[in-house]
Image (tube, rainbow, N blue to C red):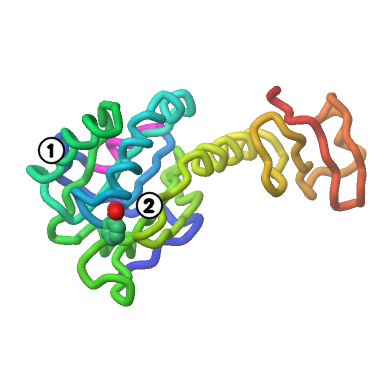
């Protein structure tokens, strides 16, 4: 059982999916990635989750993020289930679902938590940067559907902080003020953040979002 931690290179793999065979790193290319597992096909919460992701597809695309789901069911099952998702969630599932029947990838990413379930993957999420490094990990219980608005919010934060010397505060949303990184000296702020800043404490300096 492997543990995948922030900053690690996302383990590479080859897999059968609902859209054919893929090599994960090659499939990601220069994009950001979201890899998320769900317990099983033909289950209610999972059906709403995959439908939501399909409906959010333009939001992921706008952010240059490729999404890919995984469960331990096979391709034939995925294909039948996708018909149900499309019908019930009023969508078209246009991202691949990995068929991890031998649980090889689930093991690689530690998606099976035996004390929760011996046989099914938990609701794991991995956000992967264009450098193939893990930027976020999340684990949800089977009974709680994930909040995909929160994933988009984290992606916005990651993409912003990758470009500017800032971090995002609690409950930040795209367009809110951001925190100036503590590595930026006071004397360098004016040049770096021409929109101005507020110095609440020496370590807490806020500025309007630089790219807005
Ligand atoms: C669901 O997706 O509804 C689900 C899957 C496994 C266990 C409990 C709920």
Give the label on residue 54, or none: none
Indicate which label's residue lies in the foreground, 1 or 2: 1
Residue, x 18% and y 54% (percent of image)? 100
Q: Quadrant of the N terminus?
A: bottom left
Mark 1, Cα crowd under 10 Å, few <14 / some 14-19 / many 20+, is some
Percent position of residue 55, x then y: 37, 29
Task: Report the Cα–Cα distance between label 1 and label 2.
Answer: 26 Å
Q: Is residue 17 above or below residue 12?
A: above
Q: Residue at x 32, y 50 (%)?
A: 45
Is tag 1's residue or tag 2's residue first in the polypeptide sequence? 2
Identity of the residue drawn at 28% across and 36% down: 27
Q: Is residue 23 placed above or below 125 in the rendered structure?
A: above
Q: Residue at x 62, y 35 (%)?
A: 160
Quick check: 29 left or right of 107? right
Can you identify the residue that label 1 sits on? Answer: 79
Quarter location, residue 84: top left
Question: Residue 104 in the image: x percent, y percent?
Answer: 20, 60
Question: Crowdedness of circle 2 by 10 Å Cα count: few (<14), some, many (20+)?
Answer: many
123 and 105: which is toward the camera = 123
Secondary structure under the numbered disc 2 in the rendered image: loop
Looking at this view, name the residue that lies furthest to the left. 76
Task: Determine whether, in the image, residue 206 is placed left or right of residue 109.
Answer: right
Counting from the top left corner in percent of width and height, residue 24 is at 27, 43
Q: Which residues are magenta?
A: 23-31
Q: Quadrant of residue 110?
A: bottom left
- State the residue position of label 2: 10
Determine whether the beta carbon of the residue marked 2 sits less than 8 angstroms from the nearest atom of ligand 1: no
């Amino acid at each position: 059982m492997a543990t995948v931690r922030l900053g690690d290179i996302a383990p590479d793999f080859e897999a059968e999916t609902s859209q054919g065979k893929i090599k994960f790193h090659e499939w990601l290319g220069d994009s950001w990635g979201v890899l998320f597992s769900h317990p099983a096909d033909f289950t209610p919460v999972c059906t709403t989750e995959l439908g939501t992701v399909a409906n959010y597809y333009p939001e992921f695309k706008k952010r240059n993020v490729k999404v890919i789901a995984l469960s331990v069911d096979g391709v034939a099952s995925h294909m039948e289930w996708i018909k149900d998702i499309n019908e019930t969630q009023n969508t078209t599932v246009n991202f691949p679902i990995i068929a991890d029947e031998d649980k090889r990838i689930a093991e690689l990413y530690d998606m099976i938590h035996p004390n929760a379930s011996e046989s099914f993957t938990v609701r794991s999420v991995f956000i992967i940067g264009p450098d193939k490094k893990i930027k976020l990990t999340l684990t949800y219980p089977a009974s709680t559907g994930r909040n995909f608005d929160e994933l988009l919010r984290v992606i916005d934060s990651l993409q912003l902080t990758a470009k500017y010397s800032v971090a995002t505060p609690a409950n930040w949303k795209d367009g809110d003020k951001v925190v100036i990184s503590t590595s930026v000296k006071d004397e360098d702020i004016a040049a770096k953040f021409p929109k101005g800043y507020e110095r609440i404490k020496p370590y807490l300096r806020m500025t309007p979002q630089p790219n807005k």
